[in-house]
Amino acid sequence: MFVAKNPVQFSKVYARPFSASAFARLAIPATQKAVVFDTNGGPLVYKDIPVPKPKPNEILVNVKYSGVCHTDLHAWKGDWPLATKLPLVGGHEGAGEVVAVGDAVTHFKVGDLAGIKWLNGSCQSCEYCESGFESNCAHADLSGYTHDGSFQQYATADAVQAAKIPKGTDLAGVAPILCAGVTVYKALKSAELHQGQWVAISGASGGLGTLAVQYAKAMGYRVLGIDGGSEEKRTKVLELGAEKYVDFTKTDDLVAAVQEATNGGPHGVINVSVSPKAMNTSVEYVRPQGKVVLVGLPADAVVHTDVFTHVVKSIKIIGSYVGNRADTREAIDFFNRGLVASPIKIVGLSELADVYKLMEQGKIVGRYVLDNYK
């Protein structure tokens, strides 16, 4: 059961304005465009599907833009040890406008801006939810994985977990913040560094890496970017605020190169790269008392660490998952204050399969954002 309140407010659509009379004719459609796959690794089909109806605790968001995350690629392939729902609409970086609210929803109204996040909902009563670690809830519902996500024009989300987006926010620009931004911001907080300390971003030119560089700089850290493959990557990472850059394809000794660039090794490493080799190397080049934060999730990856060195250097290896509601609010605030901005390229929702191909080939600098109406 859901209620559509003040539908005229829906005319305030940033990229595609409707007049009040036009909306009165359109209302909420019965069908919408979406990209759906029926089997893991199967065809990505751009087609018409029904518009979902929100449950009493949910909101219905008219999704204007959706970022494309590496997790979406894993969901499609089905190569993680967590089964997806099938058929599935992927996506978990959706930004748009609330067009309907469930009967139990009190803090969203039609016309508000909202974000569809990776964590779509949780039980709110277990020890993890109560302590701010909702993503570790055994009953977590995940957008674009166990819950149809943002690669559709209308998507539902638990109102408690949906992101509040301030009025006037650039919806295309904020879309990657809803996952990539929140994820790297939480990882940097997990490293518990001090201002002026060195942090290395491994995989610095990608969707998460470019944001990690900016958040790290805004938080007062000295930033070393690590990536390789093109001069474009180096240029972009340095433009975004990295003080130094190491191209792993142009050095025979990455450990020595990183330690030299940071005068003994970084105090913290944020591994957003999906390379197991990069993760293992980070344990070697981090300085004594340093923190290695694991964020990227390559399938079947294992981090090997020499116990003697690990103990003698007194390093910490930390797993950092997605942020909670407070992390989301803070990450969006950095964006709205102009301190971070994901380098984005906007393409149509119908081009998702092409984006996945580029992602697999490692050719993406920054983040692709889908216009859900193209």
Image: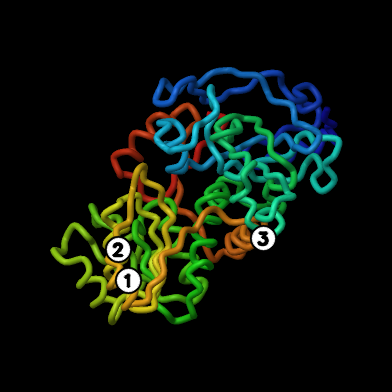
Amino acid type at circle 3 is Ala
Q: Is 291 placed above or below 36 here?
A: below
Q: Residue at x 50, y 52 (%)?
A: 180
The residue wearing badge 3 is 326
Residue 310, disc: 1
At 32% from the left and 56% from the top, the residue drawn is 303
Residue at 78% over, 34% down: 100
Residue 334 located left or right of residue 62: left
Q: How crowded is mark 1: few (under 14 residues within 10 Å), some or many (20 or more)?
A: some
Contact, mark 2 vs mark 1 (Cβ under 8 Å): yes
Instruction: Identify the secondary structure beneath mark 3.
Output: helix
Q: Earlier in the sequence, mark 2 or mark 1?
A: 2
- Left or right, 329 with respect to 221, comes to right
Residue 268 in picture, x, y percent from top left: 40, 71
Marks 1 and 3 sit apart, C-alpha to C-alpha, by: 33 Å
In the rendering, which numbered label is found on residue 107? Answer: none
x%, y% of residue 290?
39, 74
Looking at the picture, which amino acid does disc 2 mark? Thr
Q: Distance between the residues labelled 2 and 1?
A: 7 Å
31 or 55: nearer the viewer: 55
Residue mark closest to the camera, 3 vs 2: 2
Residue 152, quarter of the rendered image: top right
Q: Which amino acid does label 1 sit on?
A: His
Percent position of residue 232, x then y? 28, 55
SS at badge 2:
loop
Q: Nearer the viewer, mark 1 or mark 3?
A: 1
